Image (spheres, grey):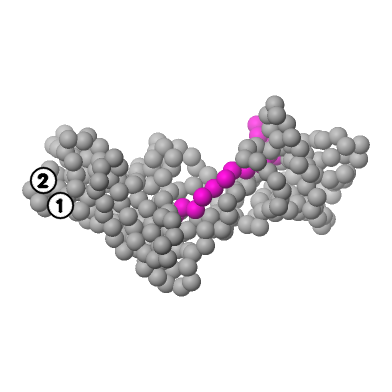
Amino acid sequence: MHAELSRIDAADVLELRFAAEEELGAGLALLRDGADGGSVPIPDVEREGRVLRARLADLPLEDGTWNVVSIDRSGRPAPVLTRDSGLSLSGRFDYVRQRRTRDLRTIRDPRGRLRLVTSSVTPYAEVEWVEVGTDTITVSGFFAYTAGGDGAAVGEVVARQRSLDGVVTAPAALDGDAFRCAIPLEPIAGAHEPERKHNEWDLWLRTPDDQAELRLASHADDVVGKKGKVVFARADLAGGGGDGGPAVRIRPYYTVKDEFSLLATERNEASA
């Protein structure tokens, strides 16, 4: 079987589209990649012309990579091939916005075989937009893997100084599953510890209903390693926020886990 398109929708339905109607045989299954093997049949499959839809939501799948295979009438598996990368940004963003504890996504391996990647997930705050101003950094995005509230509300963004005890908070506007916050930079500059070359500040979103705080991060676009790929503008604050301390430079950055943080360093003539 050779699919022109392969997608996982927000309801965990695998959709395959073929150039022509193909024989399904005995059905579809997932074979665990690797030496340990393992097979899970997909019992709920619908066929409509050249489109096949397989419901995966209730399947007992461990985290890992699974090969999507068709089973012929003699019980032998054959890989489902695809020309599609499996990535749709709009579909991926819709998927991440749903409450869930397990993430499913399709990929195409170098030999053109269709695979399913499963992973356990926890809620976080997906960063969509960042704007660096002279004394604030504004961030907006949406709740990922969890539901937002009903209508407008006010939450809080919490910036914590990594390995130190500095904490800066500011209001965050919430509207359904969307958030927007302006992080003030003067308190961060004022809390700068000059003896540390780097002062990192990790960012969390706190909701008014006292749910677990959500770490700010960017995962929905499937781009990993943003730390070496994405560079933001910087803000320079004189005198540690005006209290006579060292001048501090602050810029957003992504960590090695693609989480969103701020980096504060002492500004000197060499780095001006």
User: What's the residue at 44%, 40% (across, down)?
Assistant: 257
User: What's the residue at 88%, 44% (across, down)?
Assistant: 25
Whole-percent x, y for residue 57 in the image: 69, 53
Residue stretch in magenta: 109-125
Kind of residue sitting beneath label 1 = Gly
- CA separation in Å, label 1 and label 2: 8 Å
Q: Indicate left or right for 166 with 110 as reference.
A: left
Whole-percent x, y for residue 11 in the image: 66, 57
Determine the residue located farthest toward the bottom in the rendered image.
151
Residue under circle 2? Answer: 245
Q: Which mark is residue 241?
A: 1
User: How dense is the environment of label 1, judged by Cα within 10 Å: few (below 14), some, or many (20 and up)?
Assistant: many
Label 2: which secondary element: loop
Q: Quadrant of the C terminus?
A: top left
Kind of residue sitting beneath label 2 = Gly
Label 1: which secondary element: helix
Q: Quadrant of the N terminus?
A: top right
Determine the residue located farthest toward the left in the rendered image.
244
